[in-house]
């Protein structure tokens, strides 16, 4: 069965999944880049960005796993860019240039309609105004039997968690204190939503946890 | 220099340091015991409770370290017992029986005065109504040049953190989701308070983090 997965989702020790004040200069919010240091060091992430080298240990195993068997992505609008409110024009085409590292259909949640954008390398951005269930249905349709990966941000992951729609979450805990940012867990009762946590795997720069939803937790 | 230390302080992956609804039956709140599984498995904790055996790896190293060079303790009132409000009588003498595992002076923060209780084995419970600074001063005086260990609970640790009075915190992150309980980090900007986090040490049942306050962070 294809799954809805969150993977390589980085959090700080103080439970924050992104910094505050996202902008063109700080796509992950102020300080947010420190959460992702482990990922940028891996071979898979470097290859994805057209670079050689990179680590090959536990962190890399999780990075590689995060990209495996993904047939479509879902992103919150802020993951696609720093623009808020109605689209002023069609100039903004994502953070990643003309050949984004997805290579599959990407469904962007937004309140503001916009025509799909076909990029190079197989990525097409679709803009979904009908909410998280519509995005999920369209993504599974497009994924051709593969998994759908939910990229974030924190607010979108929390919405899908609260709706019990996520099958697996891989959290990469970075040994940093962010202090200010978007808390992933606040007010979410994950055991009540059916989630359980596996023992951690220790990577070079992060500690990895897998959360799964119990069969009985579906609702 | 003697330090104020928090040690072997267990938190869940979702950042909770205790469960809710503490009672005689649930001294750590509902579900809270799962956070401390790593500790109860160690040789130091077992010895402290008069039992043989126990683990001898990384978890044990941190457990042993938590008890080393401690000249006095500070506890929030709920750590001492489940009674709320004025003391109805002098019957409650702590969770631990007549020979508590402290063996040094213990300063209990409370709004309700009570005479000190001298227990067996060197533990004396002193009840401090003057607030966290008074408790700290009295504890350092009593510690005879050794460290003061702040045992908790979550609310008291947060108060001492916000006042920048803690020199070192050892957090033991247990791979469990608690869902409901007392969040340790919520609303605390630890980097702004001068705290930094070391790379983790992987134990058998928990992942250990040390937080230190920068020299310049004292205020």
Image (cartoon, coloured by chain):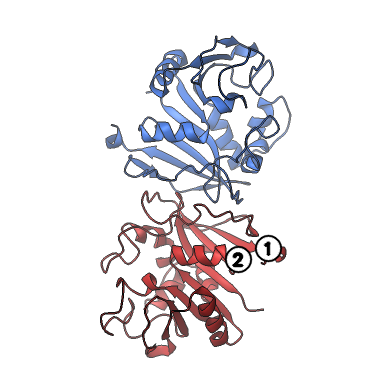
Chain colours: A blue, B red
Q: Which residue is pictured at 41% across the width and 51% down the height?
A: B176
Q: Which residue is pictured at 62% across the width and 27% down the height?
A: A82
Image height of B86 relative to B218, above or below: below
* Front in this rendered view, residue B135 or A36: B135
Q: Position of residue A160 (x, y in %)?
A: 41, 31
Q: Is residue A202 left or right of residue A164?
A: right
Where the C terminus of chain A falls, by quadrant?
top left
Task: Name the disc covering residue B217, or none.
Answer: 1
Q: Contact (CB < 8 A) between labels 1 and 2?
A: yes
Q: Quadrant of residue A18?
A: top right
Where the N terminus of chain A falls, by quadrant?
top left
Q: Residues within 10 Å of mark 2 (few under 14, many from 20)?
A: some
Q: Residues within 10 Å of mark 1 (few under 14, many from 20)?
A: few
Image height of A117 relative to B109, above or below: above
Q: Which residue is pictured at 57% across the width and 66% down the height?
A: B163
Image height of A32 relative to A103, above or below: below
* Front in this rendered view, residue B102 or B201: B102
Q: Quadrant of residue A104?
A: top right
Q: Position of residue A209 (x, y in %)?
A: 48, 44
Task: Name the disc covering residue A123, or none.
Answer: none
Q: Position of residue B112 (x, y in %)?
A: 36, 78
* Front in this rendered view, residue B183 or A124: B183
Q: Which residue is pictured at 48% across the width and 75% down the height?
A: B131
| Chain containing mark 2 | B
Task: Name the disc covering residue B164, or none.
Answer: 2
Image height of A92 relative to A61, above or below: above
Q: Position of residue A142 (x, y in %)?
A: 46, 13
Secondary structure of residue under mark 2: loop
Q: CA distance from mark 1 to mark 2?
A: 8 Å
């Amino acid at each position: 069965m294809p799954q809805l997965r969150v993977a390589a989702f980085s959090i700080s020790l103080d439970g924050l999944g992104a910094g505050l004040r996202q902008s063109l200069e700080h796509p992950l919010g102020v300080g947010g880049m420190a959460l992702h240091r482990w990922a940028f060091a891996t071979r898979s992430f470097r290859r994805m960005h057209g670079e050689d080298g990179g680590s090959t240990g536990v962190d890399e195993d999780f990075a590689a796993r995060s990209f495996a068997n993904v047939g479509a992505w879902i992103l919150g609008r802020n993951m696609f860019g720093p623009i808020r409110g109605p689209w002023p024009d069609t100039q903004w085409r994502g953070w990643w240039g003309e050949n984004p590292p997805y290579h599959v259909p990407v469904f962007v949640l937004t309140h503001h309609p916009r025509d799909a954008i076909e990029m190079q390398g197989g990525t097409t951005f679709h803009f979904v105004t009908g909410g998280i269930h519509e995005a999920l249905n369209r993504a599974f349709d497009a994924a051709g039997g593969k998994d759908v990966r939910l990229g974030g941000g924190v607010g979108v992951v929390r919405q899908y968690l609260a709706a019990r729609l996520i099958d697996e979450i891989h959290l990469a805990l970075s040994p940093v204190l962010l202090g200010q940012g978007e808390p992933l867990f606040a007010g979410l009762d994950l055991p009540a939503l059916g989630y359980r946590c596996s023992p951690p795997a220790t990577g070079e720069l992060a500690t990895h946890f897998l959360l799964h939803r119990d069969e009985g937790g579906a609702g």
